Amino acid sequence: MDATRIPTSVFSAMGKLLDYCLNRKQLQRHTAEAASKLVSVLDRYVRDCAAAASDDGYLPGANPQYNDYRNRKEQCADPVLALPDIPGWNLLPLRYTDGVRDIEHRQNDISDVLQEAFEGDFGALDEYFAERQRVFAELGFRATLLSRDLRAEYGLMPPSVRHRERETLLEKTLQYHDGFSIRLRRSERRIARQARMSEQNDNQRDG
């Protein structure tokens, strides 16, 4: 090999290595930006799910014992995970993109699940609102797990204290509505119904 051509070859290799490093750094930056935007979307969904998971059909702070259950209605709209166009979405690992799609697919079954709960309710809508709370607590917690993993993997800023409280609420609500709590919930509802019936009887006597 001609000795005069060696420096040119070395410089060419160094240039290619530098381009590779720059492109890799830019790719990592684009991926982190996509992760950050996805976390923002998931956090908004978690916020809405926390509201639905604490919605019992009464105004916030109202005591169910002193409110007519026949006037119960949703105090917030059903949360919807609507994914916007995120640049660099295809750069994210499959476990995140597939996790988001899984939540979207599960949303498609919510209306049927809630309709069944409504039709099977005895009239006070306890079963309906319990199922609504459970469904959105589960979806919100799935979004929470994705958001936590994205923050950890890409070094994103942690959520606010208020948002952590929402995440904790979702987790506790989900635990409350799992199979281990069925007997407890039934007992609580029976006590609440007895209290309402007792109050109604008292009002009728007073009338």
Image (cartoon, rainbow, N blue to C red):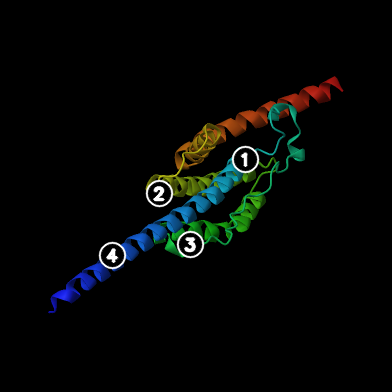
In screen coordinates, is 106 left or right of 12? Answer: right
Q: Amino acid at mark 4?
A: Leu
Where's residue 92, x and y in %? 43, 59
Disc 4 versus disc 3: distance between alpha carbons? Answer: 24 Å
Q: Are marks 4 and 3 in contact (CB under 8 Å)?
A: no
Q: State left or right for residue 105 relative to residue 17.
A: right
Q: Of tags 4 and 1, which is closer to the observer?
A: 4
Outermost residue on the top side: it is 206
Q: Nearer the viewer, mark 4 or mark 3?
A: 4
SS type, badge 3: loop
Q: Give the CA separation, mark 2 to mark 1.
A: 28 Å
Label 1 belongs to which residue?
51
Q: Horizontal placement of 75 versus 109: left or right? A: right
- Mark 4 in CB contact with mark 1 (< 8 angstroms): no
Under circle 2, the secondary element is helix
- Mark earlier in primary sequence (4, 2): 4
Q: What residue would you read off at disc 3? A: 88
Question: Which one is earlier in the sequence, the residue at label 4 or at label 3?
Answer: 4
Which mark sits nearer the N-terminus, 4 or 1? Answer: 4
Q: Name the residue: 27% across, 71% down.
A: 12
User: Is the residue marked by circle 1 packed among few (<14), some (14-19), or many (20+) residues within 10 Å?
Assistant: many
Mark 4 secondary-structure assignment: helix
The residue wearing badge 2 is 154
Of 166 and 5, the residue lying toward us: 5
50 versus 200 height, above or below: below
Label 2 is placed on what type of residue?
Tyr
The mark closer to the camera, 2 or 1, is 2
Residue 139: x and y in percent read: 52, 49
Measured as percent of width and height from the top left, residue 135 is found at: 55, 48
Pointer 4: what residue? 17
Q: Amino acid at mark 1?
A: Ala
